[in-house]
Image: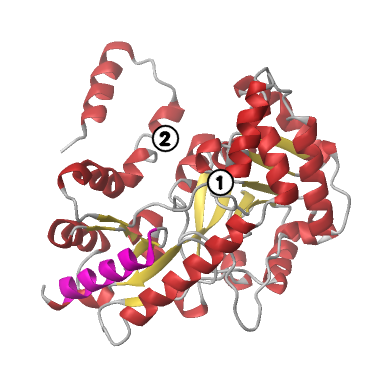
């Protein structure tokens, strides 16, 4: 049965035939990817015991100091247009941050500011890929990646990330996926939805393959500050850490996850100066940087605020352990231990149910909302994704309900 918006579009197309190809390419790749979450939100008012574990929205508030800086900045009149590249103070803060982390000077010409990672990713991809190109991406993948790639007209090519090897991208899998049309690799580490983190050596191998084949890397690093403490320590690594990859690497990120500030929409692109200069006019046809008062807050956050990320790392690591401990010995619920991020994947293949049926019935019978792994690619089809962004007691209760569900169905 077609959705209401599909019916309206069909009727309008018959009358006008006026929509561009991009609208057809992304028709079912936007909010329809999140139907389980939308359905849960609709149930919320009439289901007081509902537990929603669908999206990665931090459960702690943004630091009050950051809110005050933003508010004071608005009161001081920092509400005018920004430049297309971004506010000077934010560019300086980003230059300092990435120069320190990469060990080489990241200049103003290497930086563009945007409202959030999603906008940064979309514009970066639009600047590199088009019809006839192929964009490589690890599978599982974040649900919005397909729409971002399809919007350009390029073909998405999935590189299998297998559970048996920790959902890490291997040289063999990447090289097998490469063709003469391969233009971009969309890399994501720390990874959503699995929480896998690539080592520095793994990133160097991947980068060398891309360099050899003249492939750009767009590196989504929004979870860089959310790697859990563990032994031995696991450190974040980026292609930008290697001087040789600075010619073909574009990094996108934001403060949405690291500073629990998704609603502020403050992100950026770091890339080669020529790439940024070519991308700037495209950016300026859509927007002119981010809001000055948000830029002021972001600059301060990057230079000073660390407690939020530290708190979230501890919270999410502890809650992941709650899930792991709760499902120990339950044959039909096999969680994959994440090393970072806000989620945990649970293998439900032994239940005999598809991930769509499992999540739908779990919501109906136990009032626990999760995301089906099929929303994140072929390699995740036997999993569900649970968010760790609710209090510990709620995670424990959700686990108990899930165990009741599988043991009684």
In this picture, is 369 found above or below 351?
Answer: above
Placement of the N terminus among the 4 image quadrants: top left
Label 1 crowding class (10 Å Cα cut-off): few <14, some 14-19, many 20+?
Answer: many
Say if residue 32 shows up in the picture.
yes
Residue at horizontal 71%, vertical 32%?
Answer: 279
What residue did someone put label 1 on?
256
What residue did someone put label 2 on?
25
Q: Residue 387's image quarter?
A: bottom left
Residues in magenta? 390-406
- The colour scheme of the drawn protein is secondary structure
- Give the residue furthest to the bottom: 329
Label 2 crowding class (10 Å Cα cut-off): few <14, some 14-19, many 20+?
Answer: some
- For label 1, the SS is loop
Q: Is residue 45 left or right of residue 224?
A: left
Say if residue 383 shows up in the picture.
no
- Residue 167, percent from left and from top: 50, 71
* The magenta stretch spans residue 264: no
Magenta: main secondary structure: helix
- Residue 293, percent from left and from top: 65, 28
- Give the residue furthest to the right: 105
In this picture, is 169 found above or below 277?
Answer: below
Q: Nearer the viewer, residue 101 or 125?
A: 101
Placement of the C terminus among the 4 image quadrants: bottom left
Q: Residue 163's image quarter?
A: bottom left
In this picture, is 129 found above or below 392?
Answer: above
Q: Nearer the viewer, residue 312 or 367?
A: 312
- Residue 217, percent from left and from top: 68, 52
Residue at horizontal 33%, vertical 46%?
Answer: 34
Q: Is residue 74 left or right of residue 409?
A: right
Q: Nearer the viewer, residue 135 or 36?
A: 36
């Amino acid at each position: 049965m077609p959705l209401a918006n599909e019916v309206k579009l069909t009727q309008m197309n018959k009358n006008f035939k006026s929509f561009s190809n991009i609208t057809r390419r992304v028709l079912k790749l936007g909010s329809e990817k999140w139907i389980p979450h939308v359905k849960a939100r609709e149930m919320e008012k009439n289901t007081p015991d509902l537990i929603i574990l669908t999206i990665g929205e931090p459960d702690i508030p943004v630091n009050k100091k950051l809110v005050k800086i933003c508010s004071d900045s608005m009161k001081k009149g920092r509400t005018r247009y920004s430049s297309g590249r971004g506010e000077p103070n934010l560019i300086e803060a980003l230059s300092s941050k990435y120069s320190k982390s990469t060990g080489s000077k990241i200049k103003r010409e290497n930086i563009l500011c945007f409202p959030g990672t999603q906008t940064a990713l979309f514009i970066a991809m639009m600047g590199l890929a088009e019809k006839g190109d192929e964009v490589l991406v690890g599978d599982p993948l974040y649900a919005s990646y397909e729409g971002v790639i399809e919007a350009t007209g390029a073909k998405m090519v999935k590189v299998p990330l297998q559970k048996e090897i920790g959902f890490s991208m291997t040289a063999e899998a990447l090289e097998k996926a490469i063709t003469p049309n391969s233009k971009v690799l969309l890399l994501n580490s720390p990874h959503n939805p699995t929480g896998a983190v690539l080592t520095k050596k793994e990133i160097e191998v991947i980068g060398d393959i891309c360099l050899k084949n003249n492939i750009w890397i767009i590196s989504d690093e929004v979870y860089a500050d959310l790697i859990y403490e563990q032994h031995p320590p696991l450190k974040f690594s980026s292609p930008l850490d290697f001087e040789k990859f600075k010619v073909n690497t574009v990094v996108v990120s934001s403060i949405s996850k690291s500073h629990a500030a998704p609603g502020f929409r403050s992100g950026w692109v770091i890339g080669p100066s020529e790439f940024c200069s070519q991308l700037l006019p495209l950016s300026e046809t859509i927007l002119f940087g981010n809001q000055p008062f948000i830029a002021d807050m972001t600059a301060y956050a990057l230079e000073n605020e660390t407690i939020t990320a530290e708190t979230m790392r501890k919270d999410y690591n502890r809650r992941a352990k709650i899930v792991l401990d709760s499902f120990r010995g339950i044959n039909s619920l096999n969680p994959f231990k994440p090393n970072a991020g806000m989620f945990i994947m649970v293998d439900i293949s032994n239940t005999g149910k598809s991930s769509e049926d499992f999540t739908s019935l779990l919501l109906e019978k136990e009032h626990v909302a999760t995301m089906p792994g099929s929303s994140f690619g072929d390699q995740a089809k036997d999993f569900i994704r649970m968010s760790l962004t609710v209090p510990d007691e709620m995670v424990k209760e959700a686990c108990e309900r899930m165990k009741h569900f599988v043991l009684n169905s």
